Image (spheres, rainbow, N blue to C red):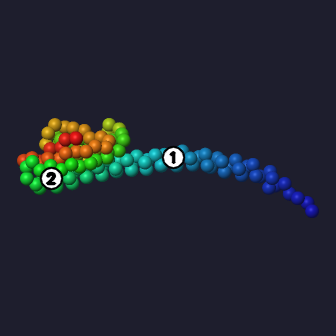
């Protein structure tokens, strides 16, 4: 019986091509994973802003002086900017760049402040809006 050595000779070539294809696919896959991770963090920050907006709306329907406490968890590298001249909007920042705005039905009164990380906020109903302070 005569044996052919084509399989033995072509095996290293097939392995080399397989590793070449894998090495070309790894960077795009890693980039896609990083992009998805950043999007998830931005979505979590926007979700925190929407929770704050809903809580402010609930407080605004009550009489002046009514207070509630709201716990928020803003992701790392993100923060929320509230109050100031844009009291009707909660601005969401990621790495110092504004990535979203959540518009509110009631304004947040007072100076501009920033919310980051895990925190507990006190929302107080005042005439014409809501005051927010970190506890």
- Residue 59, which numbered label? 2
In the image, what residue occupies the spot 32% across and 39% down? 97
The picture quadrant where one finds residue 98 is top left
Q: Residues within 10 Å of mark 2 (few under 14, many from 20)?
A: many
Using the numbered discs, state the Cα–Cα distance from disc 2 to disc 1 in whole angstroms.
Answer: 44 Å
Query: Measured from the top left, where is residue 9 in percent x and y?
Result: 80, 51
SS state under label 2:
helix
Query: Measured from the top left, where is residue 110 in percent x and y?
Result: 14, 39
In this rendering, would 133 be left or right of 31?
left
In the image, what residue occupies the spot 15% across and 52% down? 59
Q: Residue furthest bottom?
A: 1
In the image, what residue occupies the spot 22% across and 41% down? 135
Label whose residue precedes the other's in the sequence (2 or 1) = 1
Q: Residues within 10 Å of mark 1 (few under 14, many from 20)?
A: few
- Whether residue 131 is situated above or below residue 54 in the rendered picture: above
In the image, what residue occupies the spot 18% across and 50% down? 68
Foreground residue among 63 and 14: 63
Q: Which residue is mark 1?
A: 30
């Amino acid at each position: 019986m005569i044996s052919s050595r084509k399989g033995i000779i072509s095996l290293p070539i097939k392995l080399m091509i397989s590793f070449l294809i894998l090495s070309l696919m790894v960077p795009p896959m890693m980039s896609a994973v990083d992009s998805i991770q950043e999007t998830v963090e931005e979505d979590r920050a926007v979700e925190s802003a929407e929770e704050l907006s809903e809580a402010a709306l609930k407080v605004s329907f009550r009489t002046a002086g009514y207070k509630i406490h709201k716990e928020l968890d803003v992701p790392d590298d993100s923060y929320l900017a509230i109050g100031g001249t844009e009291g009707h909007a909660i601005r969401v920042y990621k790495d110092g760049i504004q990535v979203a705005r959540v518009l509110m039905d009631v304004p947040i009164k007072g100076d501009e402040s920033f919310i980051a990380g895990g925190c507990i906020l006190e929302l107080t109903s005042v005439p014409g809006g809501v005051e927010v302070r970190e506890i």
